[in-house]
Amino acid sequence: MNISIDLTGFAGLAGRLGRKIADAQRNAVYYLAEEVQTRIKLNLEGAVLAVRTGQLLQTWSRAPILVTEPSGNVAATLASKSRYAAIHEFGSDGDGRVPGLPGGVIRPVRARALVFQLADGSWVRTQQVRIPARRYISLAIEYAKARAPNLIRTAIMDAISGRVVA
């Protein structure tokens, strides 16, 4: 009995498989970033923060997911251009500052006091307001982490079938 194995074309197969692996990595990173972005939007639609003007939500809704490969690693970037994004995530410390960022306290600019109505209908008059942390981003990341195995499996299957999203 003779068994013959021909490896002609093996290098090409390995090259194609290598591309599929790279595609799966990019898909997985994109799917995870997309999951985080979707969760951020849900959190801003009332799950964590109540919608007032919708400006913060709009900045996340319009933010593109950028997938890059710095130093051979695959990374995704999500960003909000809203100046309120960080303070709502981290809150302000005792001095009214977001750690590492300017600001953190809202004070009146053109009036003697801030005056606003609460959800229960009562009115508040004060000299400043400190913003509490409302972890809408970190909760979204934790949710995506829990879904990561399924998202990675989908990314691999999509790459094998030729679907590349990033």
Image: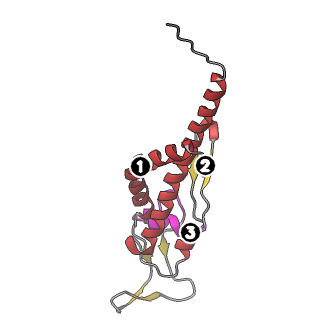
Whether residue 119 is situated above or below residue 6 in the rendered picture: below
Q: Position of residue 113 (x, y in %)?
A: 47, 87
Left or right relative to 96: residue 10:
right
Left or right relative to 59: residue 124:
left
Residue 30 seen in render: yes
Task: Name which quarter of the figure residue 128 lies in.
Answer: bottom left
Residue where numbered disc 1 is placed: 150
Residue where numbered disc 3 is placed: 61
Residue where numbered disc 2 is placed: 164
Residue 97 seen in render: no
Left or right relative to 17: residue 115:
left
CA gap between label 3 and label 1 equals 24 Å
Q: Looking at the image, which residue is at 50% across and 88% down?
A: 112
Q: Amino acid at mark 2?
A: Val
Q: Judging from the image, what secondary structure is the residue with disc 2 in?
A: loop
Q: Amino acid at mark 1?
A: Asn
N-terminal-most mark, 2 or 3: 3
Q: Judging from the image, what secondary structure is the residue with disc 3 in?
A: helix
Whether residue 89 is situated above or below residue 117 in the rendered picture: above
**Label 3 neighbourhood size at 10 Å, few (<14), some (14-19), many (20+)?**
some
Magenta stretch: residue 18 in it?
A: no
Q: Looking at the image, which residue is at 44% across and 74% down?
A: 45
Whether residue 116 is situated above or below residue 78 in the rendered picture: below
Bounds of the magenta segment:
81-102
**Label 1 neighbourhood size at 10 Å, few (<14), some (14-19), many (20+)?**
few
Tag 2 near tag 1, CB within 8 Å:
no
Question: 52 and 16: which one is in front?
Answer: 16
**Label 2 neighbourhood size at 10 Å, few (<14), some (14-19), many (20+)?**
some
Q: Looking at the image, which residue is at 64% across and 29% down?
A: 15
Question: 31 and 118: which one is in front?
Answer: 31
N-terminal-most mark, 3 or 1: 3
- Labels in figure, total: 3
